[in-house]
Image (tube, helix red, strand yellow):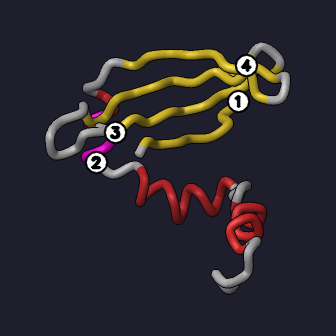
Amino acid sequence: MERTDPDWYNKLYDDKIYIPIDTFCKQDYPIIFTKELISKLRNSKAGYVVSDFNGQKLYEVLITATKPSVQFPEGALHTFQFVKTNNAYKFWGIDSIP
């Protein structure tokens, strides 16, 4: 895909937005969930927020993995999103800032 194509990002995003769970577990999980990150997540206090996403409630668990500092002014925040279905919560996705 050429970056000169004005829609290159939209095409890439459309292709990669939903990753099959087996692909995520094999390829992405080990890259994202390192021992260092898991330790930070376990030792950090979680916050919670409920937001609306196209009329559906999205439940987010917010964890600050790195507090803002001179070296990292934005810090690092990880969010884990869930939707409630049939009285259970279904994993929706993860994000990190930055």
> Which residue occupies 46% across, 43% down?
96
Q: Nearer the viewer, mark 2 or mark 3?
A: 3
Give the SS element for disc 2.
Answer: helix
* Mark 3 Cα shell of 10 Å, populated few (<14), some (14-19), many (≥20): some
The span shown in magenta is 36-40
- Please tell me whether residue 55 is drawn above or below residue 93 in the rendered image: above
Q: Position of residue 71 (x, y in %)?
A: 16, 46
Q: How far across and down, in percent of the image, does residue 76 sit?
A: 34, 39
Which residue carries the number 3 mark? 76
Mark number displayed over residue 90: 1
Disc 2 residue type (three-letter): Lys
Q: Position of residue 6 (x, y in %)?
A: 73, 75
Q: Is residue 28 above or below residue 9?
A: above
What kind of element bears circle 4?
A: strand
Is the residue under label 4 in contact with that under label 1 (CB below 8 Å)? yes
Residue at horizontal 64 percent and vertical 81 percent from the top = 3
Q: Nearer the viewer, residue 17 or 68?
A: 68
Mark 2–mark 3 distance (CA, rounded to whole Å): 16 Å
Amino acid found under the numbered disc labelled 3: Ala
Query: What SS does tag 1 mark?
Result: strand
The residue beneath circle 4 is 88
Badge 1 density bin: few <14, some 14–19, many ≥20, Cα 10 Å? few
Q: The residue tagged with tag 3: helix, strand or loop?
A: strand
Residue 25 appears at what percent x and percent y? Answer: 56, 56
Quarter of the N terminus within the rendering: bottom right
